[in-house]
Image (cartoon, rainbow, N blue to C red):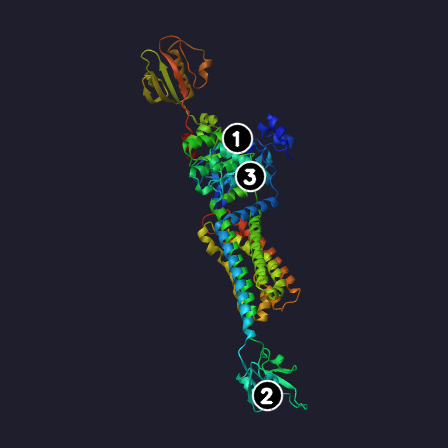
Amino acid sequence: MLEIKGITRRFGDRTALDEVTFSVAGGRMTGFVGGNGAGKTTTMRVILGVLAADAGAVELNGSPLTAEDRARFGYMPEERGLYPKMRVLEQLVYLGRLHGLAPTEAKRSGLDLLDRLGLAERAADSLESLSLGNQQRAQIAAALVHGPTALVLDEPFSGLDPLAVEVVLSVLQDFAAQGAPVLFSSHQLDIVERLCDDVVVIGGGRIRAAGSRESLRTAHSGREFDIEVAGHHADAGWIREMPGITVSHLDGPRARFTAATDAAAQSVLARAVGLGTPVPPADISSAGTVAEAASEALRLHRFAPVVPTLTEIFQEVVQ
Amino acid sequence: MMVPPAERNTSPAQSNDPDGREQTGSVSPPFRAAGSSGPAAPPRQSRSVWLVAEREITTRMRSRAFVISAALTLLIVLAGVMIGGIMQQRSADASANPEPAVVAVVGETPKALSGTRFEPRPAADEGQARAMVEAGEVAAAVVPEPGAAAVPAPLTVLALTEVPEGLEETLTYVPAVELLDGTPNGFNPFAYIIALGFGMVFYMTALTFGTTIAQSVVEEKQTRIVEILLATASARALMAGKVLGNSILALGSVVIILVLAAVGMLATGQDLLLGELGGSLIWFGVLFAFGFVLVATLYAAAASLVSRQEDVGSATSPVLMLVMAPFFLVIFFHDNERVLSILSYVPFSAPVGMPLRLVLDSARWWEPIVSLTLILLAIAVFVSLSARIYSNSILRTGARVRLADALKG
């Protein structure tokens, strides 16, 4: 568990990070989301000790991070950096050795990573002769070559084609599955949404939201619901007549509505359930439950809160 | 404090629970890349320094441009030594068959002079002979020793600055010699050539490897790999590694140049010259090694202020002046004892100035040791300043970092 506690960093009179606090759990992928200049890169540099913080601390498993701990981290900076004229495998061996591996170990590890990333046959080529996407893969390999205890990646997916995203993703997921904390930033919210367990949203140097993906979505879902009824001549039009309900969308058996109060939403649900044979209330209590009626008559097919996408949450919290 | 690999593999609690490191007090890498046995203990600072130095060296040795320019330098040195040898050979041949020299003679021409290359020209008395020598009409004058009673009177040779070669030997006995112009010769070609030689080697090598180190610093800054490196090794270790690697390369090439020059001298029969140079060549190597460390740290610090290769030239120009100035000063003042003594103690010009004074026999045995001590002191001061500048500016990309800001941090 990597904990970032109250990190503040100023550049001149500009406060780049203001009491930034969040944690990156081991074995989980944590997405770090924020606009340009929000403080993602500065935070990552502070974690790696590349930049010093003006206040606050970074802790690993409860004790302050030492230079020795940091040397075992894997880091991929935002601005891609490897030696352009050096051969790919040699760079990996060099970086592995700087991190403390023996030469043979570093070579084996480098070759294996290149193989998994689909770069094995380019191992002896100079970095500058690779395509940008392949340079990116080499960069990932550079962050992983020493078998790091934690991984901090700044925009690891930018510039990758969809296939390469999958390859890199699977390597990172393998890595996270071993139990290490993985923190990565991204502008591509759809990717973060798809593969992150936890999400941290930063804006203007402050943490705006943090937590597991599901809890964030639940926390940011309002009283908007989707309802769908089924059966002969199924029509959800009756919802409009319910008190405290604003229908935003209606299409035959399907409707989306916003309830003014929880009670209003519950009354819609009760009425919908009442359309057919009553079902045990326990099934209805949780979101997304499919309530089914045995009869051929009208019945409730679906009733679920509308869960916001990460993009929506992001837009909401960063405002 | 490593958990043996087998234990690590079979213990899911350790490999899956990052808190395991707390309980066991040992490091359990959660991810094992490529069948490696996980991260070893991070290298100590000295190992990082050496790894960086090693990369600098191997990268340079593989660069075609470097190999070609090094080979070219060696060829030039070899050619210089060969040409020097041939010139010396020719001048030796010339002195074996010299032009006839006119010698003023008072009274009876000594028998010894007849039939030699010396052409006698009669003078009325010693006074006229003296005037002819001073006017440069004759190379020398042979006059009877004033007030000598013996017959034939013992002879005295009068000459302006030096006695024409062979004249003394021609006379049957060693005559007294009186030099009329006491001031030494204004131009010493030997000192000039040695100054030029040492100066060129120092200047070229310091410039080549100084520029190399500057480019290497900016390359890391420009590609931002320095961020990855800084997450493992300290800025000081990175800079020390670069200085060490390039110093080894620079000293290596100087040693090769000196050995090649020595072999060339032996091969062309200039072993006398080599004997005369020997000690100063060794001192040149020693002073160069430390002098270059000084120059290299300054190059690294200056280069760390900028972020683009295009700016390396302007950023390092003050350091270039420090390398170039001694080169020209030593050459200009190779015959000025006082200026040369000062230059032989200034750390930047000492590697050229002190060996030159050793060749010219104008330095006492302890002087190069003092000079070396001064260089070491300068290294202590400049290295800590340079390391400060380097650490403070290596991450500041974009516009050029102001020196004052870099020193403040």
Task: Give the x, y percent position of residue B85.
Answer: 55, 65
Indicate which disc residue A96 carries: 3
Along the line of sight, which residue is nearer the eye, B390 or B313?
Answer: B313
Find residue A44 and report its horizontal and vertical position in percent: 51, 39
Q: What residue type is labelled 1?
A: Phe
Query: Does dot 3 land on a helix, a strand or a loop?
Result: helix
Q: Which is more toward the observer, B360 or B381?
A: B360
Say left or right for B214 vs B3: left
Q: Which mark is residue A175?
A: 1
Q: In this view, does A8 lie above or below B366?
A: above
Q: Mark 1 lies on which chain?
A: A
> How far is disc 3 from disc 2 in space, using C-alphas?
90 Å
Q: How crowded is mark 3: few (under 14 residues within 10 Å), some or many (20 or more)?
A: many
The image quadrant where one finds the C terminus of chain A is top left
Residue A144 appears anywhere in the view: no
Which percent across, then down, holds residue B233? 57, 43
Residue at mark 3: chain: A
**What SS does tag 2 mark?**
loop
Position in image of residue B295 (x %, y %): 55, 56
The residue lying at 32 percent from left, 15 percent from top is A235
Camera-nearest residue between A253 and B84: B84
**Given this view, does label 1 or label 2 mark the residue nearer the observer?**
2
- Same-subunit check for callouts 1 and 2: no
Badge 2 crowding class, 10 Å Cα cut-off, few under 14, some 14 to 19, many 20 or more, is some
Identify residue for label 2: B109
Q: SS at mark 1?
A: helix
Residue depth check, mark 3 versus mark 2: number of the one nearer the observer: 2
Calculate the distance from the C-alpha at mark 1 to the C-alpha at mark 2.
106 Å
Residue type at mark 2: give it: Thr
Q: In which quarter of the image is the N terminus of chain A?
A: top right
Q: In which quarter of the image is residue B139?
A: bottom right
